[in-house]
Image (cartoon, rainbow, N blue to C red):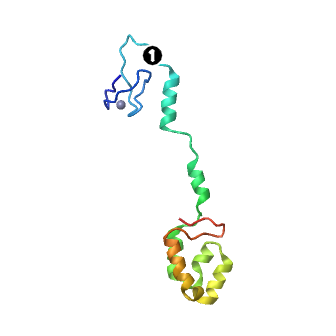
Amino acid sequence: MVCKNCGANVGSEYRLCPYCRSELEYPESKAAPQPIIIQNVINNVNPINSTPYVEYERHSKKDKSVALILCVVLGMLGGHCFYAGKIGMGILYLFTCGLFGFGWIVDIIRIATGSYKDSKGLPIK
Ligand SMILES: [Zn+2]
């Protein structure tokens, strides 16, 4: 069976083309395919998958660009630490000018590369 829409050679058991999902035109004499085949095609196109939820759990809910701006502008005062929920670290940065500037520079790089973590240990991406 050749699909008239995209020209793909598909098995005669399909009613819908698995490549372009257009309806295949069979001669009148052929028996109608079983409905379960159509269900299989739909399932292949839209697999039941919960990956978005898993991704959400792996990353921090905090926004990377907000953290980066806070770090560049207020990093010496621990602004990004407070944003990430690390209050103790923020207070330490506040009194030591971002660990004398070293912690500040390191944190800018870590936020920019997506390896900076929030108070729950989830990377801010
Ligand atoms: Zn097709």
> SS of the residue at dot 1?
loop
Q: Quadrant of residue 55?
A: bottom right
Q: Looking at this rendering, what residue extends furthest in the right direction? A: 88
Q: Mark 1 vs ligand 1: CB under 8 Å?
A: no
Callout 1 amino acid: Ala
Mark 1: give few (<14), some (14-19) or many (20+) Cα within 10 Å: few
Q: Nearer the viewer, residue 115 or 94?
A: 115
- The residue at the point 66 percent across, 83 percent down is 91
Q: Nearer the viewer, residue 102 or 26?
A: 102
Instruction: Please state if 83 lies on the left or on the right of 10 as rendered.
Output: right
Can you give x and y, in whole percent of width and height, for residue 38 in the image? 48, 26
Q: Is residue 101 above or below residue 2?
A: below
- The residue at the point 49 percent across, 72 percent down is 112
Can you give x and y, in whole percent of width and height, for residue 111 in the image? 52, 72
Q: So how many labels did they put on this image?
A: 1
- The residue at the point 61 percent across, 64 percent down is 122
Quarter of the figure that contains the N terminus: top left
Q: Looking at this rendering, what residue extends furthest in the top direction? A: 29
Q: Is residue 36 above or below residue 27?
A: below
Q: Quadrant of residue 30?
A: top left
Q: Label 1, on which residue?
A: 32
- The residue at the point 51 percent across, 29 percent down is 40
Can you give x and y, in whole percent of width and height, for residue 51 in the image? 56, 49
Q: Is residue 61 above or below residue 70?
A: above
Quarter of the rendered image showing ligand 1? top left
Q: Is residue 3 above or below residue 69?
A: above
